[in-house]
Amino acid sequence: MKRQLNLILLIFGLGFLILSGCAHRKAHAPVLPSDPSPGKSVSSNREISLSEGTEPIAEEKDEFLDEFESEFEKKAVTVADPLYFWNRTMFHFNDKLYFWFLKPVAKGYRVVIPSVVRTGVRNFFSNIFTPIRLTSCLLQGKVKAGGTEFIRFVVNSTIGIAGVTDPAKKYLKLDISDEDLGQTLGSYGIGNGFYLVWPVLGPSTLRDSVGLVGDRFLNPITYVKPVEASVAIWSYDKINETALHIGDYESIKEAAIEPYEAFRDAYIQYRKNKVKQ
């Protein structure tokens, strides 16, 4: 276990140094045009907290879908894609994984599990991910947002029955702060590096991938033993989240002339806007 932690820390450190170099070069060298090309399969790097007993209807679009539609007709924000063939292969792998496995399982789960339970599960996971958002807020100097996250955690963990309900939002009007360490690195002026698509995890960049490693250290699920139990909990969260958003991925894909390129540009624009917030 100690050897694995040292390896992860080494990867995190090397990635940070690489990103710092990318940011330095970006600040002192002319920007060369790069091939436009996007990517996002199953939604990631976002937490949505709903009031108790509510669930989005099928026609309601989530945040990423709204971001896609508002930015699709604007000039795309391009990022280098040197691993184009790998990324495209992983994009198609994730696409098939969604349609052949994740969506059918999520649809069956949706039939069996009532909407109020699915919403409660989503709220529960959102609550236990608080350390990621709280730490990211504080590292960015967003003290007020960090305080809000702390109060939300205390209120929802107690009155909200371990976070299954969201009284902090319903009664105190305290909204969740959608922050992660990838956004934190971006707020420090560290550039994206280059675009990446990971199997199962979906679209990312070099910067966001380094941030993802840090997020894992702050994620309580990581420390569940044995590892198989941790993976099972993570998988259940993804199935539940997919069940709440069936149709969003399909809508974006159908609207795109070239899905890989459209998804990639939409993801980069989405993350750029998140860093600015």
Image (cartoon, rainbow, N blue to C red):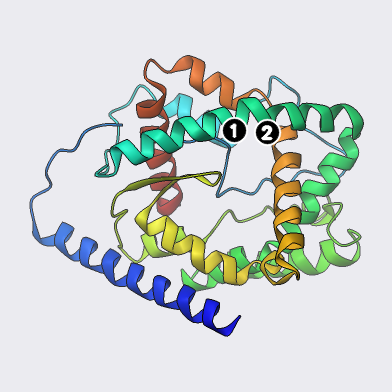
Q: Nearer the viewer, residue 251 or 2?
A: 2
Is 261 on the left or on the right of 145, as rendered? left
Task: State yes or no: discs 2 and 1 in contact (Cβ < 8 Å).
Answer: yes
Above or below: residue 6 compared with residue 26: below
Residue furthest bottom as drawn? 2
Residue drawn at the location 90% of the way across and 35% of the way down = 113
Name the residue type under label 2.
Leu
Q: Residue at 60% x, 56% y: name it.
A: 177
Q: Position of residue 193 (x, y in %)?
A: 28, 55
Q: Which residue is mark 1?
A: 97
**What's the residue type where badge 1 is placed?**
Leu
Q: Which residue is mark 2?
A: 102
Secondary structure type for disc 1? helix
Label 1 crowding class (10 Å Cα cut-off): few <14, some 14-19, many 20+?
Answer: some
Q: Quadrant of the N terminus?
A: bottom right
Q: Horizontally, is 270 left or right of 176 in the view?
A: left
Is 110 in front, or is 78? 110
